[in-house]
Amino acid sequence: MSTLFTQALIGYEPIVDRQRNALAMRVTVAPRDAQVNMAAIYREMLAHRAGTGGKIALRSQAAIDEELLELEPSKELWLEIPASLVESEVGQALVNRLHAAGFQMMLGGRPEAPLQAELVAAFRLSIIHVDDDRRLQQPLLQAMQAQSTFRRSIPHVNEGVRTIAMMERCFERGAVAVLGWPTEDALEHVGRENGNPNYATIVEMMSMIDRGEDPVAIEKVIRRDAALAYKLLRYINSPGFGLSVEVQSFRHAVMMLGYARLKRWCALLLATACRDSNLRPAMVASFRRGIFLEQLIGTGQDEQLRDEVFILGVLSLLDKLFKRSFEDLFRELHVPERVRETLVARRGPYIPYLRLVESIEKGPDPQLPSRLDDCVLSLAQCNHAVLRALTAPDLLAA
């Protein structure tokens, strides 16, 4: 890992569309070295991706200059250009050259004056804070009438959204996405175990796996639940498995996965079974937590530790999703003792990992270095794990 990534603080948040899917992850990089420019950050981002698991929208206060033109642009890595840059002739010329070279760009903020046509074409999206979006201050009918006579030239994303009501208001007034997600508000308004008919079935399956019951018995449980059966077959037949023939038997699917992998899939399903679309980003966030913690531990390390921190991340929002305490939830569900201790009692050897992932989601968080010290991990290891997790193919599938 380069010097840049041993020093830079990183944080991330999703750009979520109307269907509650992530268009990209906005990654904010705060280098401690004032001499680091955007070209250096872009180069390192490309070097440490895990694959094609998702798009990253790169944001930083680092200088954007002509050195970027020496790099090969990637369609998977977007640049966020601050509005202040396009307010000068030099900045406008640079943006036009970056666009001609093939760089994918977003406009951050509102420029003082309307953009020229060639600059408009350079940007995939613009990011506008809710406080600066005049349409949000207007009654809906007036905003729709204004939209019929004047359309934004660049599709826009609203940031600063803190409630589901404001999110709906943004979408009504033409936003294609919102930056981040009002998770706390969404969790606050969900009903008890809302839309989660598969919970008891999944718990039963995990208990059967723990007891080592025969695949035939597990198959019978799967067959009782059409949604569960569909998800299992879709998962086992996904391109990531690379199977030459399609698996159509539930028993065959169980045997192909193996009990360890099947239990891991069940743990993920617990956090993603709810049908409330406003909770989908929170459900995917729990999966993202699991992947990040797994990547943080790294390959070649204790496999039991990797499996347990994955489960910790995936289950870490379960109490909020189901409006039940972890103590209550874990009466029905067997989890590793260290995971139980972390989530029920907020203590034990895994607490530093949970605090770390919470810090990353707020980032760039000044407390991150001390959180890493508690985990006995370096900033470089953390940043590498962030990039690998955000571009993991499994995350895109989720």
Image (cartoon, rainbow, N blue to C red):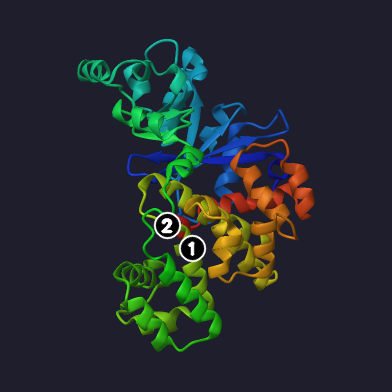
Taking the spot 64% from the left edge, 36% from the top edge, the residue there is: 364
Residue 315 rendering spot, x and y as whole percentages:
55, 59
Q: Residues within 10 Å of mark 2 (few under 14, many from 20)?
A: some
Residue 48 rendering spot, x and y as whole percentages:
59, 51
Nearer-N-terminus badge (1/2): 1
57 with respect to 177 (left or right): right
The answer to which image quadrant residue 294 occupies is bottom right
Q: Which residue is mark 2?
A: 398
The answer to which image quadrant residue 146 occupies is top left
Q: Is residue 37 visible?
A: yes
Residue at the far top: name it.
113
The answer to whether the residue labelled 1 contacts the one labelled 2, judged by CB atoms less than 8 Å apart, is yes
The answer to which image quadrant residue 302 occupies is bottom right
27 with respect to 365 (left or right): left
Taking the spot 35% from the left edge, 54% from the top edge, the residue there is: 275
Please give the label number shown on residue 268. 1
In the picture, the quarter occupied by the C terminus is bottom left
